[in-house]
Amino acid sequence: NKAKPKRGSSCKTCSLCPPRIDDGFFSLRYKPQSQQLQDIADTCIKVGDCSAAKDSKYRTYDETCNNLRFPMWGVTNSALVRLLQPKYSDGVSKHRKAQDGSDLPNARLVRTTVLKDKMVKDKKVSYLFSVFAQYISHDTARTSQAAANFTSCCNGNKWPGQVPVNCTSTRIPDNDPFYKKFGVTCQGRIRSLTTDDFGCPLRPHQHVIPVTHFIDQSLIYGQNKQDMEKFKGKNGLLQVSEIDKRIFPKSNANPQAVCDIRQGDRGICFDAGDPRPNQNPPFTALVTIFVRFHNDFAKKLLKLNPKMSADDVFEETRRVMIAVEHFIVRKEWLHLLIGREFMIQAILNYTNIDYDNNYNEFVNPSTLNEFMNGAYRGGHSTIIDKLNIHSQGKTQAMVLNDWLNRPQFAVDNFDPILKSVCTTQMPKQDIHGSFAMNNLFFRRTRPFGLDLETTSIERDREAGFAGFCDYMETLLGEPKINSWNDLKRYFTQETIGNMRKVYKHWRDVDMYVGGVSECPVGTSMFGKLFTAIIADQFKRWLLGDRHSPTFKDGPGKFTKAQLKQLNKITMSYLLCKYGDKLDHVPSKPFEIKSKKVVCKDLPDIDMTPWKL
Ligand code: HEM
Ligand SMILES: [Ca+2]
């Protein structure tokens, strides 16, 4: 069943892309790494005894002892892992230098010259795809910031001369096409935490994330047991808030500090296992759907088994929630991201969920630095600047920048948002970001804001990634790149021309910039490099998880009868059941052209396989 992609077939909107004469990714020399030895970053984490966790059906909350041989793999506050050694100029933490020893070109200049603002719509995929992509990102990654005051990173909006401690501010060129009008010469940013901050003198340093690396709904349940206790309610339920007779995530105890609450607003602000449930209204809506699902399933479980303890109801429901998240990734979502043919190559082709023997204790399930600070940030080009919402015969535009950290919009327009994300075409995953995200981001009441993609370039440099050419040659085994001309294998002429305006040498091109600019390969949304990194990452998460819901010898496996029911909990099921009152939803909600499901015709899942 090895489906072969047609050569250059995915260059639908980009007729100028080169044919992928190397036959796409099927000839990759790159192999997902299985690590026989502890990753060096593991030396930072000490984990105690795993005997209690060994046979438990349930994961620990910080994921310690998921892997019994390497019990620190993927746990909260552990370091990312790397596919390639970094190229820090001092071997430890300082930015990579250009080939001639000078600094790499200014990140904002690279952004405006190579990654230009433009909105191209995807013909196949709905905006819900992007919202779910962010769900996975908040489950598995988060840039933790060093102790610094954001406003101190620039001198007002002016370049401070010397970047203050713990900041990685970007100098905005004086002749910037947008910021010049406003006299802005600095974009502030706080550096991310590294192993050094945790007293672990790794050389070169590595970045640490404050979340469990696994796909495990930690964005709902928290990153450790103590966190979880904050969200656990009575009878196995999650604590929730009730607004206008509907269920939403728990209210935030510090709404003024966490949310953007303006005069006349209702003061709505939520809290969840990851602190970003309020970030944008469609995302808040998706978090709410999963919170509602937890409480509905938990109630049914307790009704069926009145003697079950509240703790068991909570744990079992969490286990189901995680399985549902995994199954949506495997069955409905991942093939749209990296292409079915690549899923097959990476042994990730699940269309029907059944037992497997895929767990491999030598696969490190940790989040890759190249994924978090590289490939997956490319997804920012799929963020919509405004979403048209149809409600009560009227259409209003939700301008995303006006509704960041203001979840009230999601509460007031819950079903209309769900309908809209299913029927709106997603901005295409490509070299372009939106003007709104890359000039106006978080502008609040100002006429200008931040540039999210400049931040991605800066995070690549903080991570010390080798250049794009090194990645292609060393990681993917591509032929040596000896000239700008050789880059024609991967980019359009226009992209190469733009790169040449800012980079002095082709080997200077940043990994992020090259990766996001690459023409797509096969039916993947990405080029070869980002496809390979993302496939490797999902392989780690799905195959390196002892608690995989389908691992046949695993402690977390479901019975056959339970699996049959879980197979029915699809994205359309969740929308129908946990939207407020939707009549119908698409049967494939991540795809624009999809048949309808009439919600009242959709049977509930049968709970009997959970009868004790
Ligand atoms: C409206 C939607 C979104 C907004 C407002 C948003 C905003 C942000 C912000 C502010 C950061 C932190 C930047 C930094 O300081 O380093 C970030 C990081 C990140 N974003 Fe997004 N993002 C959105 C959607 C997405 C999507 C759709 C994806 C993936 C396809 C994604 C993937 C990531 C990743 C991997 C990171 C780095 C890890 C982290 O800090 O969470 N984001 N995003
Ligand atoms: Ca997680």
Image (tube, rainbow, N blue to C red):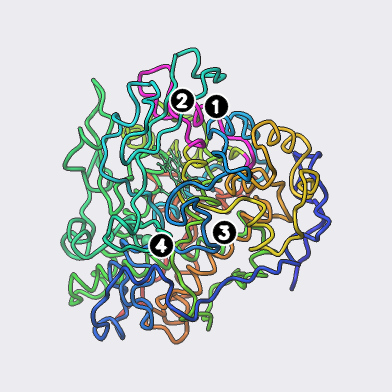
Q: Report helix, strand or loop for mark 4.
A: loop
Q: CA distance from mark 2 to mark 3?
A: 28 Å
Q: Please report contact status of discs 4 and 1: CB closer than 8 Å, yes or no.
A: no
Q: CA distance from mark 1 to mark 3?
A: 26 Å
Q: Is residue 306 above or below residue 25?
A: below
Q: Please report contact status of discs 2 and 1: CB closer than 8 Å, yes or no.
A: yes
Q: Residue at x 43, y 55 (%)?
A: 574
Mark 2 — residue? 440
Query: Quarter for ligand 1?
Result: top left
What type is the residue that disc 4 sits on? Arg
- The picture quadrant where one finds residue 307 is bottom left
Is residue 433 inside the magenta stretch?
yes
Mark 1 — residue? 435
Q: Report helix, strand or loop for mark 3.
A: helix
Q: Residues within 10 Å of mark 1 (few under 14, many from 20)?
A: some
Nearer-the-camera pick, 312 or 378: 378
| Nearest to N terminus: mark 2 or mark 4 | 4
Residue 493 lies, in percent from the top left, at 79, 37
